[in-house]
Amino acid sequence: MPTPRSLPRHAATRYVQPLREGGSLPAVVDTAAGGLFVVKFRGAGQGPKALIAELVVGQLARGLRYLDGAFNFDATAAGELISADFATRLVWLDALATNPDRSHRNPNLLVWRRSPWLIDHGGALYAQHDWAAVDEARTRTPFARIRDHVLLDRAGDLGAIDAALAAALSPDVIGRALEQVPDELLVDPIGGREFASASAARARYREYLEVRLRAPRDFVAEAARAQGQARSAPARPLSARR
């Protein structure tokens, strides 16, 4: 496997403003060379594992940046910007990563330059919070909360793209994503020091993702079942606007 490029590191020069959303207490900071970034602090309530999930899932989805001027996604205002292909891929990814934070109440989608962008994967990969209890059966379990996904009813045929998406997340791709996670997060004492080394931690995350990706993928069948139920349910009422 080729040596992956490390994520760039920047020194914050100015605390611009807090973002009073979520337990990770994010903030916008300015840097000397990289411009503005949204920063999440590993000493905040959710701890370093939220940052690990953020990095791993963000790297698998490809893309981390600050979106100046973006606005929150609203299906009634920006629904036409979401293609069926995008929705299908996102439902599949969130089911794989066990991401509960893509609901109608909290979609964690921004619209920037008329394109949708994903934010906040800190709640994903929740198996990491109790590795000792995660055997193969729990690794492969379906993700029932996919039924609440904000784009579930907009997604296309999940089964039709399942094999291609699983193949795209090869062991090399997973390995490169995990290499981007700084060692100090993987063995941070706040996280409980479950692993003797960062390499041991990466091996456990890699094993989890590779087993979860093995066919048959129960999370895809569960998502398709939930999709069928969502399409047969009554339409959601539009929220009142002033």
Image (cartoon, rainbow, N blue to C red):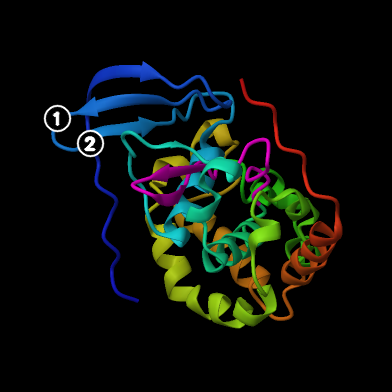
Q: Which residue is mark 1?
A: 32
Query: In this image, 14 relative to 214: left or right?
Result: left
Viewer-proximal residue among 195 and 99: 99
Amino acid under disc 2: His
Measured in 3D between alpha carbons, the distance from the residue under mark 2 to the one under mark 1, in whole angstroms, is 8 Å
Q: Measuring from the top left, give residue 72's x and y in whole percent.
A: 49, 36
Residue 211 belongs to magenta span: no
Q: At 30% from the left edge and 18% from the top edge, which residue is drawn?
A: 16
Q: At 58% from the left edge and 24% from the top edge, which residue is drawn?
A: 45
Identify the main secondary structure in magenta: loop
Viewer-proximal residue among 102 and 76: 76
Residue 158 figure quarter:
bottom right
Residue 221 figure quarter:
bottom right
Q: Secondary structure at mark 1?
A: loop
Please indicate, yes or no, whether residue 217 appears anywhere in the rendered image: yes
Amino acid under disc 1: Ala
Q: Residues within 10 Å of mark 2 (few under 14, many from 20)?
A: few
Q: Which residue is mark 2?
A: 10
Please indicate, yes or no, whether residue 108 appears anywhere in the rendered image: no
Q: Measuring from the top left, give residue 223's x and y in whole percent.
A: 75, 64
Q: Secondary structure at mark 2?
A: loop
Is 166 rendered above or below residue 238? below
Q: Measuring from the top left, give residue 157's x and y in whole percent.
A: 67, 75
Residue range (magenta): 99-121
Q: Residues within 10 Å of mark 1 (few under 14, many from 20)?
A: few
Q: At 70% from the left edge and 31% from the top edge, which residue is drawn?
A: 239
Q: Are marks 2 and 1 in contact (CB under 8 Å)?
A: yes
Q: Earlier in the sequence, mark 2 or mark 1?
A: 2
Q: At 37% from the left edge and 32% from the top edge, which residue is drawn?
A: 38
